[in-house]
Image (cartoon, rainbow, N blue to C red):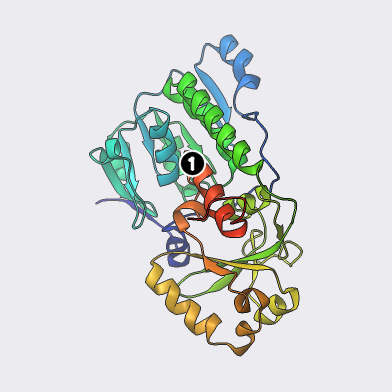
Amino acid sequence: MLKLLRFPARLAAGLLLTIAVLSGCASAPGPEAAGKSGDANTEKQEESGTFFTLTDDANRTVVLPSRPERIVVLSPQLLDLLYDIGGSAIARTSSAGAAVPEKAKDITDVGGITSVNTEKLLSLKPDLVIGSPSFHRELAAVLDSSHIPFALFNLSTYQELKQKVPLFGKLSGKESEAAERLAKLDEQIRALTGKVPDKQPTFIMLNVTPSSVSVQRANTIGLEVAGMLRMNNVAESLQASQTSQTTAPYSLEKIVELDPDYVFILIHGARGDGEKKIQSDLAAQPAWASLRAVKEKRMTILPSDLLLSNPGFRLNESVLHLAKYVYPDQFDAK
């Protein structure tokens, strides 16, 4: 009998595009690629004779006897990153709405991102499995008992990207390629943020799913990009939701009170479903039309692939997209 690891429906729905976690709004990014799993482990590797020992984002110690050659990646974002620096995997999961790198389309599919076929996964005899802390922690027991190295990584913000690129470069033997890609991205973002005026407009960013609306409070890629553009998130001071520190409960009354210069909306899942929710829960409310951002046409739906999920080495496109909307005089909006 096939063994499937299933997750609650409310988690599966939110995963279709991304996970919004970690690191808050940032100012213009620095050039350093701050990896927490790199140089600090070098001496330990040499003494033990292992290839690499790291601590993942679930605070698990992962020991790799040799460079992994049979990697399975369970997160679409992490799979993209691995292939972007020239690495490869032997298997992946599938997820509606998540694009698969061209070179990874024919590798083995081990089930849905929230319903991993553990029997099929184990049969591949991987020497490293990479997953997400939010959705794959429960795989630890079966993989540990099978003595398969298992690492859980977050990839939500630019700072996390800067941590993971050198690490994935080492794991795949593509250190130089990883360093070059990261340096180029950093240069591109610096060039963009250097053109930003010191206006510091205010904004609020809303998450819209087919069943709910919430406010992005902290530690998401969209908020981080807005921070790079010297924008102030008025929701940062709101009390966090009980289920997530990154969000706050939606309250139209509170948004009217805060009255931000801009209202940004990010749709989770199918755009059509999200637009219906916007019409029923937002636009249909009289108080919504009273918002200054709505009256002055500074409310927009942002592209989810650039500002909801971490776009990896396309992050400069995320910055440029939002910059063109907020600062059309400084950035050619044509």
Q: Is residue 319 above or below residue 313?
A: below
| Helix, strand or loop status at disc 1 | helix
Q: Which residue is mark 1?
A: 312
Which residue is found at the position 46% from the left and 64% from the top? 268
Q: Nearer the viewer, residue 60 or 288?
A: 288
Residue 237 in which image quadrant:
bottom right
Q: Position of residue 277 (x, y in %)?
A: 47, 78
Which residue is found at the position 64% from the left and 67% from the top? 262
Residue ranking furthest to the bottom: 286
- Give the crowd class for mark 1: few <14, some 14-19, many >=20 residues within 10 Å: many
Task: Classify residue 187 as left or right of residue 82.
Answer: right
Task: Classify residue 46 as left or right of residue 116.
Answer: right
Task: Classify residue 124 as left or right of residue 154.
Answer: left
Which residue is found at the position 62% from the left and 75% from the top? 296
Q: Is residue 157 above or below residue 244?
A: above
Please indicate, yes or no, whether residue 117 appears anywhere in the rendered image: no
Q: Position of residue 104 (x, y in %)?
A: 29, 38
Please indicate, yes or no, whether residue 243 appears anywhere in the rendered image: yes
Task: Classify residue 25 as left or right of residue 65.
Answer: right
Q: Position of residue 187 (x, y in %)?
A: 58, 32
Count of number-bearing discs? 1
Q: Amino acid at mark 1?
A: Gly
Residue 173 in which image quadrant:
top left
Q: Is residue 98 above or below residue 51?
A: below
Q: Position of residue 294 (x, y in %)?
A: 60, 77
